[in-house]
Amino acid sequence: DKSLPQPIRIKLDEVGDHIKLRKADSEEKGTRVRVLGRVHRVRKQKENMFIELRDGYGIMQVLLQGKLTQTYDALILARETSMEIFGEMYEVPAGANAPLNRELHADFYKIPSNWRAAGGEDAITNRVQPGTEHATLLDLRHLTLRGDVSSSVMLVRDAVEYAFNQAYKESRIRKVSPPALVQTQVEGGATLFKFDYYGADAYLTQSSQLYLETCLPSLGDVYCIEKSFRAEKSLTRRHLSEYTHVEAELDFIDFNDLLNHIEHMICRVLEIILADPAIAEKVMKLNPEFKMPERPFMRMKYADAIEWLKEHDIPNEEGNPHAFGDDIAEAAERRMTDIINRPIFLTHFPVEIKAFYMQRDPEDQRVTESVDCLMPGVGEIVGGSMRLDDYDQLMAAFKREGLDPAPYYWYTDQRRYGSSPHGGYGLGLERFLAWLCKQHTVRDCCLYPRFMNRCKP
Ligand code: 4AD
């Protein structure tokens, strides 16, 4: 109808004075808009059709009435069909509910034939159903991503990644982008992905830490948000083969500075994301019990954790009581964290169970200045430490681990040209999200998860 006002194109979450809502019994017109999106849900009620239209920004309730419900397109309308809709914005009537308390009364819509979604047997609701096995859902990840939960987690993820960048910027920590293709290991040979690099052996990086350390002399404190790769030959709910690693390295600090910084970053990122009402709403919907962590985080030495595990009859992997020197396995770590039920900085792990580059505790040479940050429901989300800054001690550590120091010349040189007390950490973004969004597994916290035997879609 050419006599109607020209519509304005809006996203479905758009609000403001430029979008007026007509009140139920008012003559004053609402704004005429043009919206584009996909049918999230559709409901028929007598003569009316209610469509929830989704565009990735929001959901809008659209009302089709009269002739508009009688077209061929309306009669076969399947979920996920794309639509262009024109109409007038109304307040929802008293007693009814709709997102942002408004609905669009359509006066016209278009569905080009190739915008139609498959219906009948092939309808999306037949392919992705409640109770479908997780493996099938992962095969259909391109479709499950359209669901409320998956898309909410991805939107929170976007906010978290952005917040890390903002929080680092506030602390004047500079972003760099280290290489993913490397010829050195950081976290042990067992989880290296090896490949042929023009005839030479190379690996997908396990961590950007060593490269970050080389940036300190010229750039000051640095961070990166890059992919790390681990050939984890087991299936757990918190291990991926490819994950997003938030890593930082800080110059001229001591161990206590490192712990305070990690605590600050975690809390600042939470503060930033929760300041956005749309993100806060998504977090609270995914994780209704979420509370800001209390500061300071609990600090517990490894040796005390071993005592705690013994007192609580939580055995080690062999089924025996824990003893000093044991690696605290995933199950035990998570049980402890769940019982204590608050973030824990677990510190001072024995030299033997930690990486070669870690500084020893000056007060107790058996242990390192290392930290894992443990969160209820997930366990370890951060691993960090002070680094060996003495050349001879670093060389001794290579020897102890049976590592040839030659390929690490660029790393060991740091100790020959102006060494410094420094330290850093890595945070697994998917684990942070699993904790924040109360997801059972990190596999649901990345776009297309990669883990043992899965490299598709
Ligand atoms: O404890 P990790 O192995 O420490 C390092 O890589 C250090 N070089 C980081 C540093 O100091 N710059 O890994 C750090 C974090 C873990 O706490 C965990 O959150 C995550 O990375 N992570 C994984 N996340 C998903 N899948 C995996 N396979 C992971 N391995 C580690």
Image (cartoon, grey):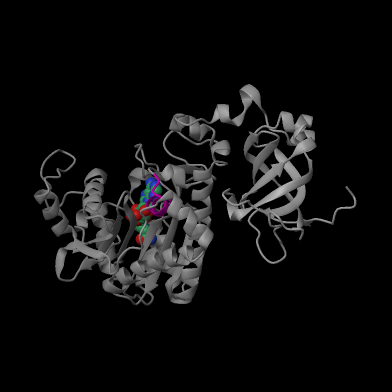
- Number of marks: 0
- Nearest the camera: 262 or 67? 67
Q: Establish if 256 lies above or below 293.
A: below
* Residue at the (38%, 66%) spot, across then down: 267
- Nearest the camera: 20 or 347? 20
- Looking at the image, residue 153 sits to the left or right of residue 41; the answer is left
Which of the 4 quarters of the picture holds residue 247? bottom left
Residue 308 location (% of width, % of height) = 13, 54
Residue 319 location (% of width, % of height) = 14, 38
Residue 370 part of the magenta segment: no
Which of the 4 quarters of the picture holds residue 21? bottom right
Residue 438 part of the magenta segment: yes
Q: Which residue sits furthest right?
A: 2
* Residue at the (31%, 71%) spot, across then down: 260
Q: Is residue 177 visible?
A: no
* Residue at the (15%, 65%) spot, across then down: 365
Q: Which residue sits furthest top?
A: 121
Overall secondary structure of the magenta stretch? helix
Quadrant where the C terminus sits is top right
Q: Establish if 419 lies above or below 157.
A: below
Residue 240 location (% of width, % of height) = 41, 44
Q: Which residue sits furthest front?
A: 25
- Nearest the camera: 2 or 383? 2
- Looking at the image, residue 297 sits to the left or right of residue 166; the answer is left
- Nearest the camera: 433 or 55? 55
Residue 160 location (% of width, % of height) = 48, 59
Q: Can residue 148 be seen in this view?
A: yes
Write the start and end of the magenta stretch as one range.
430-439
Q: Establish if 435 lies above or below 193.
A: below
